[in-house]
Image (tube, rainbow, N blue to C red):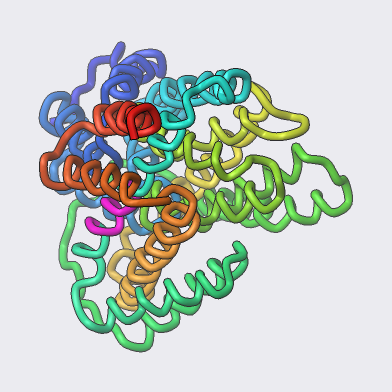
Amino acid sequence: MPDNKAHDRHPLAVFLIFLRLGLTSFGGPIAHLGYFRDEFVTRRKWLSERSYADLVALCQFLPGPASSQVGLALGFSHAGYGGALAAWAGFTLPSAIALMLFAMGFTTFGERLPAGVLDGLKIVAVAVVAQAVWGMAKNLCTDGTRVTIMALATCAVLVFPAAVGQIVVILMAAMLGLAVFKPKDLGEHDPLPLMVGRRTGLLFFFLFLSILAGLPFLAEVMPGQAISMADAFYRAGSLVFGGGHVVLPLLQAEVVPSGWVDNDAFLAGYGAAQAVPGPLFTFSAFLGASMAGDPSGAVGAAICLAAIFTPSFLLVFAALPFWEKLRRSSLMQAALAGINAAVVGLLLAALYHPVWTSAIDGPQDFSIALLAFVGLVFWKLPPWLVVLCSGLAGGAVTLFI
């Protein structure tokens, strides 16, 4: 039975529970979902095992960071909209603040760091993205058709690297999925204990689409870096399927060619993001704080963080009233199968460029990346330890080789 203690249903109580998780949840989105299950199904009994599985399925189905969306929905289920905001803040702000401070320090003191340490942070990004490709490919590219979609998506994104090309690839993969996949019905399941009316859900979806369409128009009629940043990061949060690592190519295409963030800083920040707990989407706070021009610093971090996570809020509340029917749709499952294969391809393309081409410049760099990959995938070492060791190894290479 759910825990009905009144004090436990106050948004402040929800915030404190998620703050502890935000300070300790290392290991990426799959690990986060495991922490949530242990905390809210096993210990606190906020919802049943089957309801939790259904909730995870919903958030995997939606674009955006799945673990953050599950946390958002858990907070909503227990303390309404205030609980949803409290859950997001508690889980997200620790890593966001840490990365913002790292960005400010990097901007101020980055040139004083030994070159090898910066190289080590860039190299560890190779291992982290390779780990993501490895794990996602095993789960999402399980036959020749899916592998082919993955390969075609990789080639297309490398040939047409602009952000619009990646969007087209996702849409084409959905159409291919509809044409070739015939998934089975999922059967009976427990209804989710999340009450959102259909009209409210439609209102949230209309708001999501209005912002997605309105921000580019606003950026045209009212030129300014703040609006352009909000547009770029909102679009990234709206169109990323498959978890935090897949946002890498979209963000790189937005912030590096425009000159907002140079590629070395981008990759160093991405490497540092592996060393903090919480959702990887908080990498946006690093980018916002690192921006060339104005706004940057804390204001830039706040704009980018809010913009990339807002679609998650809107889409979760938009989908909840319709999920009972949607998740039984064979058409939606087929489209998602194609999209999932394509996002592995997008990530594989990002592994080659910009990650590999910018970080690997000789046998020593490759050796560090290989050892970091083995440590992450086969020895299951904590990411923060692998990041620290890679930075030290990069510094050692510079000093002694």
Residue that appears at 29% across and 46% down: 369
Q: Quadrant of residue 330?
A: bottom left
Q: Quadrant of residue 119?
A: top left
Q: Quadrant of residue 74?
A: top left
Q: Nearer the viewer, residue 183 or 100?
A: 100
**Residue furthest bottom as drawn:** 179
Q: Horizontal and vertical percent for residue 109?
A: 58, 19
Q: As drawn, is 5 to the left or to the right of 354?
A: left
Q: Nearer the viewer, residue 202 or 273?
A: 273
Q: Horizontal and vertical percent for residue 22?
A: 34, 24
Bounds of the magenta span? 128-135
Judge whether 267 appears above or below 43 on screen. Answer: below
Residue that appears at 54% across and 55% down: 250
Q: Main secondary structure of the magenta part?
A: helix
Image quadrant occupied by the C terminus = top left
Q: Nearer the viewer, residue 84 or 240?
A: 240
Q: Horizontal and vertical percent for residue 137?
A: 25, 64
Residue 197 in sight: no
Residue 329 on the magenta segment: no
